[in-house]
Image (tube, grey):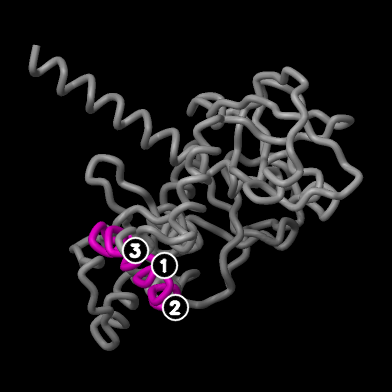
Amino acid sequence: MEKEPNDTSPTEARVGATTDLPHDRITVQRFRESFPRARWSDSLKAWFVPGRTAERRIGRWLAEMEAQADAFADEKGKDAFAFDPIDSRYLEAAPLAFQIRTPYSRNVVTEIREIPFARWDPDHRLWTVPYRSYNELRRRWPAIAAAAERNEPVVRKARREAIKGTDEEEVSKAKLRERRLKRYPVPVDNIPLFERAIGTHSGVVFFTGTNGELADPGTVGAFYFPAGQDEEHVWASWRAGSLEELVTTWPARTPPGEEELARGWWLPTLEELRTARQKARSKRRAQQRKEENEADIA
């Protein structure tokens, strides 16, 4: 390892930049080839590159090394896929990344979001996963595929047909009717702030007010959450948040505890906000497509 001349002098006085490198021979060799004037500084325990543009050149070189490392990891992922492929109608091995297109399912979204570097492509309405994340994709694929199958239109229709005329159908319809009322039970003595994002058992909502009407304990327990025998709740009206409101909401640092879950509301977590933001984006895109179609007809 070549040291810089007069290493005992303060290197900070010289014009240049320093960088720390992984302690492997190949990386150091490539660094020395790219920066032949670089010298090791014992005083700084780092490599020193002279020159006024040294910091910018080092940053560009490190970015190139990272990109090459990602490319190598992608090649390893491609090899793993070729050796142990995932055969599914929901997955396509495109040249640059895996492409996942499934019927909408909250479980699918939850699973894919846990895969490193997974991204939603709004233009093509599919998920992309880089090849470097193949191992995690492979591990989660059974849950993804099963959730997608359950949400195929024909499968959902078959489930609806199977419960026609049963108590299960009546319960499902009752839940839908209750949801359309856009109300939620909150403790009489602990009402959340209005017009801010709040996490609930029904998702992230923005409460708009309450007229003080008492909520029936049976309705609360059947459609929302188990209510304590001695607790009184009132109905609070709610609305869905806009994408801008949800994006600017700061998430809670910790998930809700038992007391908050029993209360029925809490400050939303990052995962809850992500789900709400995805719904808001989908709603906005649907509205935009509707307006574009109406403009084309006009």
The first of marks 2 and 1 along the sequence is 1
Q: Residues within 10 Å of mark 1 (few under 14, many from 20)?
A: few
Q: Are marks 3 and 1 in contact (CB under 8 Å)?
A: no
Tell whether position 152 is magenta.
yes
What is the distance, in whole Å, between disc 3 and disc 1 at their CAs?
Answer: 61 Å
* SS under mark 1: helix
Q: The magenta stretch spans which residues?
A: 138-158
Label 1 sits on residue: 30
Label 3 sits on residue: 159
**Residue ranking furthest to the left:** 297
Say which amino acid is labelled 1: Arg
Say which amino acid is labelled 2: Arg
What is the distance, in whole Å, between disc 2 and disc 1 at their CAs?
Answer: 35 Å
Q: Residues within 10 Å of mark 2 (few under 14, many from 20)?
A: few
- Residue displayed at 27% across by 24% down: 288
Tell whether position 294 is magenta.
no
Location of residue 105 in the rendering, given as x and y in whole percent from the top left corner: 40, 56
**Residue ranking furthest to the top:** 298
* SS under mark 3: helix
Location of residue 258 in the rendering, given as x and y in whole percent from the top left corner: 82, 55
The first of marks 2 and 3 along the sequence is 2
- Residue displayed at 38% across by 51% down: 119
Name which quarter of the figure residue 89 lies in.
bottom left
The first of marks 3 and 1 along the sequence is 1
* SS under mark 2: helix
Label 2 sits on residue: 139
- Residue displayed at 75% across by 53% down: 226
Q: Residues within 10 Å of mark 3 (few under 14, many from 20)?
A: few
